[in-house]
Amino acid sequence: MNWTEPKPPTDGESYYDHVKCVSPLGLIKIEWKSWKESDSYSTMLNEEYIGDYLNLEEAKAMVKLHLISKTRELIKFLEL
């Protein structure tokens, strides 16, 4: 997966620090509030919330698992 480098809040993209990755299923975004001493990393696929995680690496790993799960659902659907 090709993630962008961490970016600060960017008008029109995100109100928070973030990284993005374009996947065949859509745009994935991980956001966090860097000004907080301890903040969660929120994950989204096409602006649909996936979950919150403790750090950026965990968030990326969980997004990958989410995409694998969605791929399996699509394969099962298409086999019917």
Image (spheres, grey):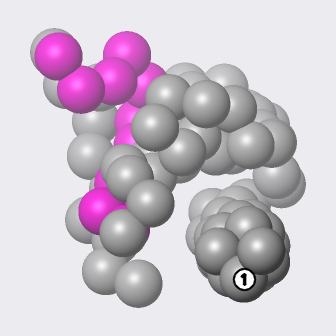
Residue 35 falls left or right of residue 28: right
Residue 64, given in percent of the width and then of the height, sits at 65, 76
The answer to whether residue 78 is above or below residue 51 is below
Start-end of magenta stretch? 12-23
The residue that appears at 83% across and 54% down in the rendered structure is 54
Residue 28, given in percent of the width and then of the height, sits at 45, 52
User: Magenta stretch: residue 20 in it?
Assistant: yes
Quadrant in which residue 73 is drawn: bottom right
| Image quadrant containing the N terminus | bottom left
Residue 62, given in percent of the width and then of the height, sits at 76, 69
Quadrant in which residue 16 is drawn: top left
Query: Residue 79 versus residue 61: which sits nearer the camera?
Result: 79
Kind of element beneath mark 1: helix
Residue 55 falls left or right of residue 12: right
The amino acid type found where label 1 is placed reads Glu
Query: Residue 76 versus residue 39: which sits nearer the camera?
Result: 76
Residue 6 falls left or right of residue 76: left
User: Magenta stretch: residue 80 in it?
Assistant: no
The answer to whether residue 80 is above or below residue 66 is below
The residue that appears at 58% across and 40% down in the rendered structure is 44
